[in-house]
Every structure is written in structure tokens, then in C-alpha cells.
Image (spheres, rainbow, N blue to C red):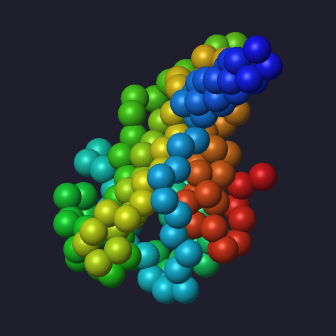
Amino acid sequence: MIARRLSAGFSSLLMAVLLLNGCSVVNVNGTISTADNELCVVPPEGKEPGMHALLLKLLRQKRFDVRELPAHTPPSACRQTLVYRWGLEQYYVPALVKQYPVAFDFYLGGEKTANASFDPSRNPISPHVKFVRSSRYWARTLDRLFPGRPLVGD
């Protein structure tokens, strides 16, 4: 009887953790701890200039020597390459906050070794996420993708 209750309780807890984890606005698969400072960045076609400049600034604050490459450059062009893409901008009124969902793919020697993403629509449980500027979440996402480098998110 007690074993059944414990099992049911554990199952409920596990389901809750899985559901909440699946709703996170920041998702990271793999992390990169690298001493190599050179990082090539491949932007998406039709990049949004302000957000692209923000990304380059954040990467430089993480002490990367950033080299910009044209869109559609293969990731094997550099030893370390960050390819990114984003979804449609999202506006949230009355906060007047514009957000960009983004996905980062990190390649080492041409092979994808890690990826991270930010998507405010992924979390229906915490609607406050929609009122935080995406630049803060981009910084937090990069902090989780590249641990061991200076933190740029708050």
C-alpha cells in the first residue's frame, strides 16, 4: 500500500518536472567549454540588423573574437562556428515588448555539437516571460550554451 502511494507520488512528480521542463523558454542541448577564442558567426538570410548587432556584442562580452561570415556559409568554414536563425517577431501589448525567438547551433570542426534556443511562446505557464525583452533571454541562453566564460545575462 505504501509502496503504491510512493510510486504514484513519484510518477506525479516526474510528470510535473517533465511538463515544466518542456515549457522552458530557454532550451539548451549540450554546452561548450572552450579556450579557443575565435568564433565565426553565420547569420540567417535577411537578418534583423539590431538583433544581429546585439548578438555580436554579447559574444564579444563573452570574450570571443567574432568573425562574421555571410549567410549560407557552411559551418566547416571555421573551427568554431555559431549558426543562428529566428522566428517571426512577436509583439506584446500593452508592454510594447518586441521579442525574437532564436535558435543557435554550435559547430566544432564542421560537426554540430550543441544547440540552444529561446522561444517565449513555449511557456504558457508563466505569461510574465512575454514582458521581458528578448535581449535578456538571448544573453541567458548564451550563458548556458558557453559556461565558463564571463556571464552576460542577469
Residue at image point 51% right, 70% down: 32
Residue 104 visible? yes
Residue at image point 48% right, 59% down: 30
Lateral position of residue 110 relative to residue 81, left or right: left
User: Which of the image's four quarters has the N terminus?
Assistant: top right
* Residue 84, above or below 78: above
Residue at image point 66% right, 36% down: 133
Please identify the quarter of the rendering in which residue 3 is found: top right
Lateral position of residue 19 relative to residue 100, left or right: right
Q: For this rendering, which residue is in front, 8 or 45?
A: 8
Please identify the quarter of the rendering in which residue 10 is found: top right
Residue at image point 20% right, 58% down: 72
Q: Residue at the far front: name it.
A: 1
Residue 35 lies, in percent from the top left, at 55, 86
Residue 98 visible? no
Residue 96 lies, in percent from the top left, at 65, 22
Q: For this rendering, which residue is in front, 82 or 52?
A: 82
Residue 110 lies, in percent from the top left, at 25, 72
* Residue 93, above or below 85: above
Q: For this rendering, which residue is in front, 61 or 107?
A: 107
